[in-house]
Image (cartoon, grey):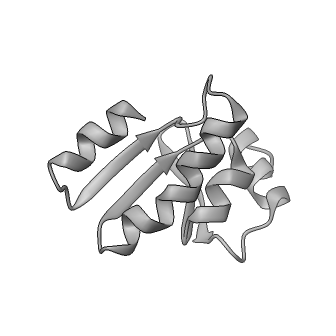
Amino acid sequence: MVAIGRALMSNPELILFDEISLGLAPVIIKTIYDALPGIVGGGMSAVIVEQDISKALSVSSRVYCLQEGRISLEGQSATVSREEISRAYFGVE
């Protein structure tokens, strides 16, 4: 949370959140994800790299899955299914 606050102090146009739920207590994860819509609501763009698919989809407008450095799936978060994400992530055709 301190790293996020520090990054926001510079008023960036784009912010990268890399594995923001990794190793944190559930109550802290909830607090961070609850704050994300307000952070990007002011016009800032955000890229979220996350292993928790449900959390990432809940706050994102688009999803991109990368497989060996290439985009294996892209689409609107509201229309991409968990099955499609699993197939793209694990490289199953």
Rendering coords of residue 80 (x, y %): 72, 69
Left or right of 91? Residue 68 is left
- Residue at 43% in and 35% down: 1
Q: Is residue 21 left or right of residue 54?
A: left
> Relative to the observer, which residue lies in front, 47 or 36?
36
Camera-nearest residue between 44 and 29: 29
Horizontal side of residue 73 vs 82, given as left or right:
left
Report the residue at 53% width, 47% height from top: 32
**Residue 63: percent from the left, percent from the top?**
57, 62
Examine the rendering and report whether any part of residue 80 can be seen: yes
**Up/down of 33 relative to 76, above or below:** above
Q: Position of residue 71 (x, y in %)?
A: 52, 53
* Residue 58, x across and y down, in percent: 67, 63
90 vs 10, left or right, is right
Residue nearer the viewer, 31 or 92: 31
- Residue 51 appears in the picture as rendered: no
Residue at the spot 67% in from the left edge and 28% down from the top edge: 25
> For the view shown, which residue lies furthest in the top direction?
23
Residue 21, quarter of picture? top right
54 vs 33, nearest the viewer: 33
